[in-house]
Image (cartoon, helix red, strand yellow):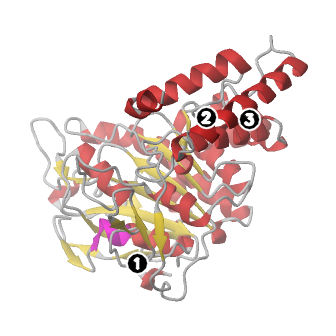
Amino acid sequence: MTNEFNRADEISRRSVMAHAAKACMGVGFVGGMGYGGSGLFGADVKSVKANPPGGGKAKRVIYLYMGGGMSHLDTFDVKPGAATQGPVEAIKTSAKGLKVSQYYPKTAKQGHHLCLMNSLTSTAGAHEQGNYFMHTSYPMRGTIKHPHLGAWAARLKGRANPTLPANVKVGRGGNSLGGGFLETKYAALPIGDPAAGLQDSKRFYRVKEDRYNKRLARAKALNQKFLQRYNQKQVRAYGDLYADAVKLMKSEDLKVFDLSQESAATRAAYGADNFGQGCLLARRLVEKDVRFVEVYYGGWDTHSNNFEAMATKGAVLDAALGSLLKDLSERGLLDSTMVVLSTEFGRTPDIVKERKGRNHYPKAFTCLLAGGGVKGGQAWGKTDAEGKKVVKDPVNIPDFNATIAYAMGLPLSEIVHSPSGRPFTVAHKGRPVTQIF
């Protein structure tokens, strides 16, 4: 049994345990609670030195990821009058001197909260590699899976709410669960459809309460005997999973996943699409002290018909982002919640005329920060007049992630050793841009 269990790959082991739980106990929750990552092994930790002073105000992060590579010129690094700008116009924001593209009127009203990071630069120009680099700060390797930022936050800060997971991913796509070599409990709890709530989180209706409790007790007894014989972290992780799942099933906090408790006007303001509703769910989750919530919005790979796509996608992003910032501010949550808008790379300033599109462009692009101690109403860094190259204060990917980690108070110099003994840190030697705080 020992050899067979150890030879099985992680997906096989998880599948067996999931089906066993659902069949024997009436629990359809296995796979959630942040146990969906690729690694089950623990990691040794070594503290080196403290962060520079001034960070740590962001108790929570809402991380909005634009999958596909978002054009900087058509969103938040506008170049009025430049040939590379195309037909997209710039509009003023509520912050003096700060402009965004015409597709973001609601977000423009929140300009006094925004920090436009207009000098991002990356070495990864392909989607999978760029996505991985942005989420982990490490180049993709075939020999190891690195933790994503949400997993690091869960590992280094723990849960603020003992019932809810510390790390949640909303939306299909992007493949960003990201436990990496950390224990799988630090990976993101996946929520595919934000409007559907947390699926399979209730006792199966055909399993009555008394039978359910007997099955739990029997499973606990069997697990205990198995653990005594095979005392491995792979096995212990599933015991923790059961305990966490049952705890949430019986908790009032389960209601946080029910968007029907919001008013029709609020839901409409965020947008009826999955991304907008995902942002609304993210706001509800951070209200309950979930530390890290990623909301995914794909389809930004605009090799063709860029400007039509920018108008459509801009409307969706603007409604959600503008409403989220306004909502968090009015509820007194923005100072302690950092909102991040990121993407794997930008798109070429030069327009491909025959396709009216823009190609991949990691050399210069824009991400966005708001709240969490960041000074609003500013742009950090600068690209040239055509948006082709960074000419002031370049920010690489590890530096960008170090800035988010710094805002959260994560220990940037704390070394975590993988199971193979290799040392890693949360942002791979990145240095935070402390001047924006």
- State whether residue 70 appears in this view: no
Q: SS of the residue at dot 1? A: loop
How many angstroms separate mark 3 from mark 2 (CA)? Answer: 9 Å
Classify 177 as above or below 108: above
Dot 2: few (<14), some (14–19), or many (≥20) neighbours within 10 Å? many
Check contact, mark 2 vs mark 1: CB within 8 A: no
Which residue in the protein does label 3 denote? 258
> Pointer 1: what residue?
432
Name the residue at the left extreme.
354
Secondary-structure class at tag 3: loop
Pair 1/3: label in front: 1
Q: Position of residue 281 (x, y in %)?
A: 65, 43
Q: Is residue 398 magenta?
A: yes
Choose between 102 and 207: the one closer to the eye. Answer: 207
Mark 1 or mark 3: whose residue is earlier in sequence: 3
| Residue type, mark 3 in image | Asp
Name the residue that disc number 2 marks: 194
Residue at 62% x, 48% y: name it: 282
Disc 2 on helix, strand or loop?
helix
Amino acid carrying mark 2 in the image: Pro
> In the current view of this chain or complex, which residue is farthest to the right?
210
Alpha carbons under labels 1 and 3: distance apart = 36 Å
